[in-house]
Image (cartoon, grey):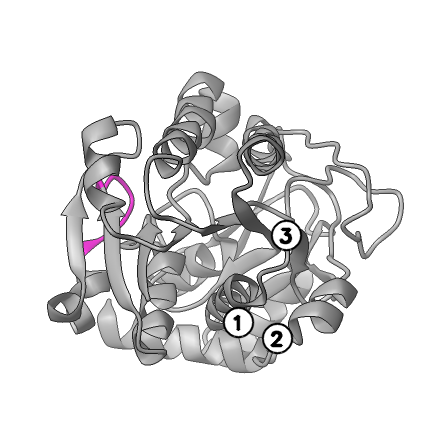
Amino acid sequence: MKVLVTGGAGFVGSHLIEELLVQGHEVVCLDNFTSGKRINLEPFKEKITLIEGDILNLKDVQAALEDVESVYHLAAQISVTQSVRNPLHDASININGFINILNTILESSVKRIVYVSTGGAIYGEPLHIPASETTPEEPISPYGLSKLVGEKYLKWFNATHGLSYAIIRPANIYGPRQDPLGEAGVISIYLGRMLNKKPLEIFGDGSDTRDYVYVKDIAAICTAAMASHVDDTYNAGTGIQTSLNELVEIIGEVTTLPIRKVFKPPRPGDVKKIALDITKAKKILKWTPQTTFNTGIQNTWDWFKNTH
């Protein structure tokens, strides 16, 4: 099958492309390299069709969708902090860019789309944890809001035009290739700072929790969702809360390096506590995360040491 991965040069997108190639698919990658990196595509660049372009540019999207049967949409503005700082920029990419994809799909041979949304930001501060797909969506950041609006548009395109879809709401994704200098991905940021012997910045008192899921497990649920042909929404996490203080301890154990911590005020838009209920994904997609947290951290640390 010929498939398109938008944002394919990114951290998650490149791992998804790897998985799709293993499964024997013909892959087209659309990326403008604003946050994606060419080096992420290096191991398999001869096996894919790369279109350097923008999801906001109609001609780029039309070229990327030529003869494509399925789309994985990962291209996005992913920083909560940046979305708070510049909500218009966030919306232009996450809403307008996605609508451009959806409109163009109607003129193509695409039968189904998998949309990678967010589980870490879409529920806001849920009353019950782990949050399920029926938990009210109450995002407290423009990023969470823009991803939710994208979901609503996708469901409208399904109801109006019959576009088949699956929505993936991932928890906090981590793993090799994540940018340690970005504003998203605390594990990569911390490991990068450990490598450079810099202190770890903790926003708040360290009690905030996240549900951390390994990147290859996210690639696996994306392909499972595409293959299922069921139009639905799925959380993708572990269901386990890990506090920042606990994360720092684990990083210390894995790296065996001394840790220095710097506490800073909480950041606007960051949720206090979150973890995701993955019962639906287990039941319908037969998916469960395969990578334990310590193993995932070790794999990521090994990658950092070998590449930085």
First in residue order: circle 3 vs circle 1: 1
Residue 62: x %, y % from top left:
23, 36
Per the rendered image, the range of residues in magenta is 32-38
Tell me which amino acid carries mark 3: Asp
- 230 or 306, which is in the foreground? 230
Q: Confirm whether residue 287 shows in the render.
A: yes
Tell me which amino acid carries mark 2: Pro
Q: Quadrant of residue 19?
A: bottom left
* Residues packed near mark 1 inside 10 Å, few (<14), some (14 to 19) or many (20 plus): some
Cα gap from disc 2 to disc 3, whole angstroms: 21 Å
User: On residue 289, which mark appears?
Assistant: 2
User: On residue 293, which mark appears?
Assistant: none
State the residue lying farthest toward the left: 46
Residue 120: x %, y % from top left:
64, 48
Q: Is residue 294 magenta?
A: no
Cα gap from disc 2 to disc 1, whole angstroms: 5 Å
Select label 3 or label 1 by which is in front. 3
Q: Quadrant of the C terminus?
A: bottom left
User: On residue 217, which mark appears?
Assistant: 1
* Residues packed near mark 3 inside 10 Å, few (<14), some (14 to 19) or many (20 plus): some
Is residue 71 rendered to the left or right of residue 44? right
Q: Quadrant of residue 300?
A: bottom left
Element on which disc 3 rests: loop
Residue under the point 46% across and 77% down = 255
Residue 115: x %, y % from top left:
50, 47
Residue under the point 55% across and 45% down = 117
What residue did someone put label 3 on?
A: 231
Residue under the point 64% across and 41% down = 121
